[in-house]
Image (tube, helix red, strand yellow):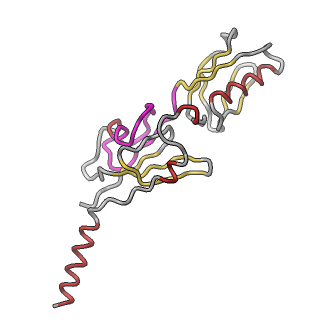
Amino acid sequence: MNRRALLLALSGSLALGGCLRPEFRTADLDATGTGSIGARYTLAAGDKLRVIVFGQDNLSNIYAVDGAGRIAMPLIGAVGIGGQSTAQAARTIEARLASGFVREPHVTVEVDAYRPFYILGEVTTSGQYPYVNGMTVESAVAIAAGFGPRAARDYAVLTRGGPGGLVNGIVPMSYPVRPGDTIVIKERFF
């Protein structure tokens, strides 16, 4: 009889344990920067940049950052800007233009379109979507046409590239998303 009661208690606790959400783990993600992307944003593959060279309309254009972190500009060719801020990229382009192509160049670099984010798992339409500034996990789910029927609706797993490689954590639905993040909406047990 005691054995039967123990098995019943054990199976009941395991069933109820599936209803609990995991503990949020955001410390490693927070170290990569959260909130508004502003000055801390570093350029990477998938970004589209508006480069303005004052007085040189034929050089001013929108350039896409390739997989190697470079943009290809007329006259100076491929310029490595991956991992730099927009201000650093402007100085890099100015230095290349000043080395025999344009006298006293003045360059401004702005992000025209951020690299996309990815959402997978229990959403209606998983895939790649354009990043919107100020986005949270919840708004990313809304962009992906909402939760699937078996989705865990109170947390997600978010993966982000950091200085030391990929970092992931379990985050609440109000957690900020950054360009290039991958969000996985897990399946609930019941």
On-image quarter of the N terminus: bottom left
Coordinates of residue 161 in the picture (x, y in percent): 55, 46
Coordinates of residue 22 in the picture (x, y in percent): 36, 60
Residue drawn at 43 percent across, 33 percent down:
134
Left or right position of 18 against 103:
left
Residue drawn at 40 percent across, 44 percent down:
175
Left or right position of 55 against 50:
right
**Above or below for 39 versus 73:** below
The magenta stretch spans residue 74? no
Of residues 31 and 107, the one drawn nearer to the viewer in this rendering: 31
Q: Quadrant of residue 45?
A: top right
**Above or below for 86 versus 17:** above
State the extent of the magenta-drawn residues as a range.
113-141
Residue drawn at 44 percent across, 49 percent down:
158
- Give the total of numbered labels: 0
Coordinates of residue 9 in the picture (x, y in percent): 21, 79
